[in-house]
Amino acid sequence: MFGALSLSSCLIQQTVGMFIRDEYPGARPPMVIKDVDGKPASEKWLKVDPTMLPPSGHIEGRITKAEDGIPYGLTSEFSNVVVSPYAPYNQLDYTGVEVGAKVWDPYTKKPFYIPRVFTFN
C-alpha cells in the first residue's frame, strides 16, 4: 500500500512539474495583499497599465466561487503565481501565503481565495 502511495505521489509531482515552472521570467509579478479580519493588510493599491493588459477571453467562465460568493483565483504556469479572477486578470505573486487563504487583488481592491487545486490554463 505504501509503495503505491509513493509511486502515485511521485507521478503526480512529475506531472505537475511538466506544467508548473519554478522560475518566473523577469521580475516577479506584484504581491497579493493579505487579508486581516476581512480587510486588506495594507493599502498599497496599484494602477493598471492599459498597455500591459493580457488577453482575457480564455479566463472568463472558468472562475469558480466559494460558498461566501468570493471567487477563487486561477493557478498559472508558474509556482506561487496566481491569476486574479478580476479583469484585467493580472498575475500576482502569493509567496508566503497559504493555499486557500483570502487575499486582495492590489489592482482591483477586491478579495479572492488562493486556489486549492491546480488548473491548467
Image: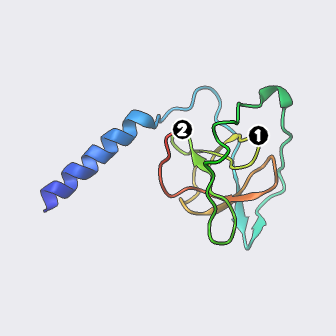
- The image position of residue 10, as x and y in percent, is 26, 46
- Residue 75 located left or right of residue 29: left
- Residue 9 located left or right of residue 53: left
Quadrant where the C terminus is found in the figure: top right
Residue drawn at (47%, 36%) of the image = 22
Q: Which amino acid does label 2 sit on?
A: Asn
- Residue 106 located left or right of residue 116: right
Q: Quadrant of residue 65?
A: bottom right
- The image position of residue 87, as x and y in percent, is 76, 44
- The image position of residue 115, as x and y in percent, is 55, 56
Circle number at residue 121: 2
Q: What residue type is labelled 1?
A: Pro
- Nearer to us in this view, 84 or 43: 84
* Mark 1, residue position: 88
Q: Quadrant of residue 43?
A: bottom right
The answer to whether marks 1 and 2 mark residues whose Cβ atoms lie closer than 8 Å is no
- Nearer to us in this view, 22 or 19: 19
- Residue 111 located left or right of residue 58: right
Distance from disc 1 to disc 2, alpha carbons, whole Å, reads 16 Å
Along the polypeptide, which appears first: circle 1 or circle 2? 1
**What secondary structure is marked by label 1?**
loop
**What secondary structure is marked by label 2?**
loop
Q: How crowded is mark 1: few (under 14 residues within 10 Å), some or many (20 or more)?
A: some
